[in-house]
Image (cartoon, helix red, strand yellow):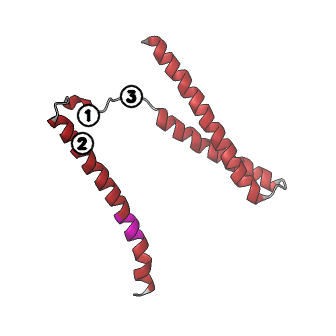
Amino acid sequence: MGPFAVGMLVPLGCFAMIFGIVYLVVTSRNRERLAMIERGADPSLFEAKKKVGTGGIMKAGLFLFGVGFGIVVAYFLASGGMDEGAAYPAMIFVFGGLALIFAYLWQRKLDKEDGNKL
């Protein structure tokens, strides 16, 4: 086997593993649902309840904004004399974490407002 053939084994193995996991999840879920229907369960239990909301999108957007802002702050800190190896990871984690905390507080506020309207 040449080096190209060996290098192809890793991506093929990863793809096969991911495919196998997805296949097992889908088939086991299908078997479980069929067994529940045979025992008399209502098929409407399997329908996902659609909740219209943008919580995940908002959280991802704020997180990416925080990471980007952390990179900008780290650039200024590194050009000001701080060690680059410490500035970039530290600021990315700090501002990414602050963005996630802000997203949580914002989502909690929105959920409270929706709860009062019901």
Against 40, is 118 above or below?
above
User: How many angstroms separate mark 3 from mark 1 (CA)?
Assistant: 18 Å
Residue occupied by mark 1: 46
Q: Nearer the viewer, residue 29 or 40?
A: 40
- Residue 111 placement (x, y as % from top left): 50, 22
> How many residues crowd mark 3 within 10 Å: few (<14), some (14–19), many (20+)?
few
Q: Residue furthest right?
A: 81
- Foreground disc of the pair 3, 1: 1
With 59 as the anchor, is 17 left or right in this view? left
> How many residues crowd mark 2 within 10 Å: few (<14), some (14–19), many (20+)?
few
Does dot 2 land on a helix, a strand or a loop?
helix
- Residue 22 placement (x, y as % from top left): 33, 54
Q: Amino acid at mark 1?
A: Phe
Residue at the image point whose x is 78% and y is 55% from the top = 78
Q: Amino acid at mark 2?
A: Glu
User: How many angstroms separate mark 3 from mark 2 (CA)?
Assistant: 28 Å
Residue occupied by mark 2: 32
Whether the residues at callouts 3 and 2 have beta carbons within 8 Å, the answer is: no
Q: Amino acid at mark 3?
A: Val
The disc at residue 52 is: 3
With 99 as the anchor, is 26 left or right in this view? left
- Residue 104 placement (x, y as % from top left): 57, 31
Q: Name the quarter where the C terminus is drawn.
A: top left
- Residue 28 placement (x, y as % from top left): 27, 48
Q: Which residues are magenta?
A: 11-16
With 11 as the anchor, is 27 left or right in this view? left
Q: Name the quarter where the N terminus is drawn.
A: bottom left
